[in-house]
Amino acid sequence: MKQHQDITRDRELLLGLAKGEDKSLEIIYSENFPVVLRMILQHNGSEDDAKDIFQEAIIVLYEKVQNNDFTLSSRLKTFLYSVCRHLWLKKVQRTYGLYSLSPELEEVIPATEELEAHQAKDQEFRIMEGAMSNIGQPCQAILEDYYLHKRSMQEIAEKFGYTNAENAKNQKYKCLMRLKKLFFDQYNTSL
Amino acid sequence: MKEEMSLLRDIERYLEGEMSEQEKTAFEELRRTNSLINKQVEEHQLFLLHLGNYGQRQQLQAKLNRIHQQLDMPALRQQAQESNQAAKRLSIRRRTITNLAAAACIALVTSLSTIAVIQNVTRNKSTAQYEDVRRVLNNIQRSQNALINDINSKSKAPLNPGTYGGTGFAVSGNGYIVTNYHVVAGADSVYVQNTRGEAFKAVSVFEDISSDLAVLKIADSTFKSQPLPYALKPQSVKIGEEVFTMGFPRDEIVYGKGYISAKTGFNGDTTAYQVSIPVNPGNSGAPLLDSKGDVVGIVTGKQTTSDGIAFAVKSAHLKHLLDEMPKDKQPHKDWNHKSHLEGMNRVDQIKKVEEFVYMVKVYN
């Protein structure tokens, strides 16, 4: 009975996450972080490691629930925990080579399938992040305001001191062209 | 540069649906005819998608960081450390217990198998060194003597020589015979045959497995009782005393001479002597007599590892055994008299004794 309740609750939380409700995200975060923190500390990680790993796992989960066909095959807790373990394993391998792996970590069944899609997306994100940080200000701010925060050109013109929206628009197109160039240069070489 | 920018503007306007109907159809026409432009449109769509993803993720990360800041980190830290320590203690304890258990199991298995191996080896050694001297009778031709006697007396004893054979000797005039238990063990029927070739059916009335003795009773009407010439000497004899035996290692009675070489038998058995005397299969149950003609023991077996070492149960033990027999089965105690053989020379002694020594034939 309890298990059934738990599953129902997990499902509701995931639905909330898919809709972008902050409350669900908060619950998921605060309920699962302590366990992951414990695990990372146990395996000689730091608190910051725990934070990074856990947030990456949440992002994985978020990407999953964005696809409508995602169904959770285990408890949410278990999913996050195993993803975290796997991410930590990879990180340790990257950082120290193989020697410092604890035997318990190696036993974990790798959540490979869950993470392949994520890795591709993560790379795209990194490329975009790199491109964004390279175009410089005020281009980055303008583009973020327009495309991500969905501000109107009028607001942007006022904010950045352009005489009219048309001028701001021209500036935006210049910035956009640079960003696209930077992005696709990286994107096409790495994929 | 200018052209690119105006194209980009057009693409954006097209994708955002800001174009008028007329412009839209014109642009779509352009897309269809100019693959380069079409590609740019698709590229821009892809770019916007990535940009959107980027925005979403950035937003999510910002949210996560906000939530993270709200967490009570010191409390969580403490909690995690405490439970980790507990887990570590538990895992160390568990590991220790597991190791101890494994070590104990190995020790147990090792000692048990060692014991088993040692026991097995000891048993093998004993069986290798000690050998019963009963005889396996194959198709040995029976003596002519016996055949003739068989015909004359029309004895009911089967002509078949039997499966196993040993020796027995009378302990009373009325048909009680002592032999080895291993001679008659598992017998269907037992026949005894004297030197004159007369065979009588016998039944085992008492058996003592520990000292390897059996008492048979002749159950045949043709048997006539006669007094024993020898006596049973209950005292133990000294080392070096000369002894002789008479048995049936073949179908003919065979005399053997030797001496007592030790006061204990095989593996320190105090109920037996070690005797230096030639014995062969078939000698089992033969009497061992001293120079005065008193029975001092019963030959039971020999050591296989060296020649001339035989073992005989002490007569004292036999006496003890006979006393212990149920009253109704007890033979007449007519061996307590003094031996009639004292002072006779060996040839005459043998002549007297051989009538009371029987070949025991076992059928099974």
Image (cartoon, rainbow, N blue to C red):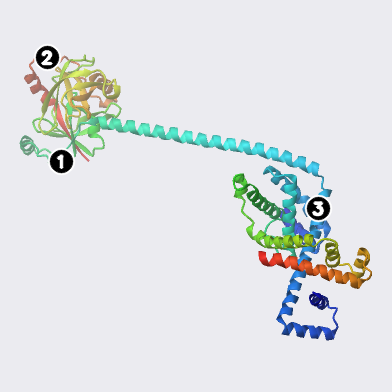
Find residue B298 and report its horizontal and vertical position in percent.
21, 24
Taking the view exactly as shown, the residue that stands out farthest to the front is B1
Tell me what residue is drawn at x 61 percent, y 38 percent.
B94
Do callouts 1 and 3 point to residues on the same chain?
Answer: yes
Q: Does residue A53 sit above or below B183 in this rendering?
A: below
Pointer 3 residue: B65
- Alpha-carbon span between mark 1 and mark 2: 39 Å
Find residue A75 and report its horizontal and vertical position in percent.
70, 55
Q: Which mark is residue B138?
A: 1
Chain at tag 1? B
Whichever of labels 3 and 2 marks the residue nearer the N terminus, that label is 3
Would you call the spot at circle 3 few (<14 residues within 10 Å), some (14-19), or many (20 or more)?
Answer: some
- Alpha-carbon span between mark 3 and mark 2: 122 Å
Label 2: which secondary element: loop
Find residue B44 and report its horizontal and vertical position in percent.
76, 73
Do callouts 1 and 2 point to residues on the same chain?
Answer: yes
User: Mark 1 against mark 2, which lies toward the viewer?
Assistant: 1
Chain at tag 2? B
Residue A2 horizontal side relative to residue B191, left or right: right
Pointer 2 residue: B342
Residue type at numbered disc 1: Asn
Camera-side residue of B123 and A95: A95
Whichever of labels 1 and 3 marks the residue nearer the N terminus, that label is 3
Residue type at numbered disc 3: Asn
Q: Does residue A12 sit above or below B245 in this rendering?
A: below
Label 3: which secondary element: helix
Residue type at numbered disc 2: Glu
Q: Does residue B258 sit above or below A4 in this rendering?
A: above
Q: Does residue B107 sit above or below A158 in this rendering?
A: above
Do callouts 3 and 2 point to residues on the same chain?
Answer: yes
